[in-house]
Amino acid sequence: MKAQLNFSPHIFAYVEDYTIRANEVDRYGQSSLTTFINIYQEAAINHAKKLGLDLLDIAKDNLTWVLSRIYLEVERFPLWREVVYIHTWPVDSAEKFAIRDFEFFDSNGKKIAAGASSTMLMDLTTRRAVGIDPYIGNISLSKVRAVDHQFSQLSLETSRNNLHNKVSLTVRRSDMDINGHVNATQYVNWALEGVDDEFYKKNVLSQFEIAYRREAFRGDHVGTVVYSFDTDSLIHEITRKKDNKELAKCVSTWKKRSSASIQRP
C-alpha cells in the first residue's frame, strides 16, 4: 500500500488507496464503474471493522450488511496502474438504512468521482432487513455530504416503445459472494451489459444509480432490458426469468466520448 493521502477537506473521512490493475481496464484503457464500486465496498467494510461493525462482528447475531441503493457521479475513470484514493464516512441513518458517502481522488488531489450508498442489515435466516439503531446508534454521523442526493424513488416511467437493447444472462458460481447471493457489482455489470455496442462506443458513463430489489442465486436466468429515457439517459430493468420478479432497477446518464477520453496506458 502506498502512503495514504487525505486530499479530502473532511478530516473524519476514512482513507484508503488503490492501484488500478490490468484486468480492470477496457479497450479504451480506462477502469470501469464496477471498479469504483468494488474499491468503495472494500473501504466501507474496512471502516466498519474499525467501528466494530465488521461482517464478523454482526455475524454472531446472524446478520450481514447488504446494499440497498448506490449512486455515483463520475468525472473520469482512472487508468491502468493509476493510484486512486477513496475517502468515505457515514452521514445518516433511518430505521433500516445506513447512508454512507464517498469520494475518489487522483494522485494530484483532483476529485474524479463521488457518491453515496444506502445499506441494510439482513437477517441471514429470514433474508429480511432488520432495524439498524441497536448497531449504529453510537456511531458519529457527519452532516457533510459528498453528493446532494437523498435516495428518493427512482423515476422509471418509460414507454416500452423506447427499447434500447436487451440481453439474457445466467448466474455463475463466480458471481456469488460471502453472503451466498450475487455480489452487488454483478448487478451493475448486468445493467451495463444491456447497453448497445454502438451507443457504448460513442458515449462514456457520467452518472449511475441502482436500486436493489431482490437477491439472485447461482443458476438463475436473468434478463436485462434497457430503455432510452432521453438523448443521454438510459433505464435498466433486471428481472429473474422464471418468475418475472424484479431484481434491480437502474438509471444511467452518459456524455459523448471524446478522443481525449481514449487513453492507452
Image: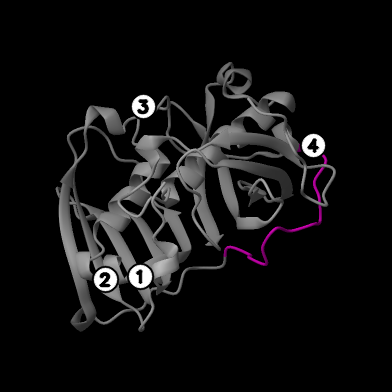
- Residue at image mark 1: 203
The spot of residue 196 in percent (x, y) is 21, 66
Give the SS element for disc 4. loop
Residue at (63, 65) in percent of width and height: 149
Q: CA distance from mark 4 to mark 3?
A: 28 Å
Magenta residues (range): 137-151
Q: CA distance from mark 2 to mark 3?
A: 34 Å
- Residue at image mark 2: 199
> Of marks 4 and 1, which one's residue comes earlier in the chain?
4
In this view, the mark in front (3 or 1): 1
Near-viewer residue (263 or 205): 263
Residue 180, disc: 3
- 224 to the left or right of 94: left
Answer yes or no: is residue 214 visible.
Answer: yes
- At label 1, which amino acid type do we have? Asn
Give the SS element for disc 1. strand
For the residues labelled 4 and 1, say whether their Cβ atoms are less than 8 Å apart.
Answer: no
- At label 2, which amino acid type do we have? Phe
Residue 142 is a magenta residue: yes
Residue 139, disc: 4
The spot of residue 239 in percent (x, y) is 25, 54
- At label 3, which amino acid type do we have? Gly
In this view, the mark in front (2 or 3): 2
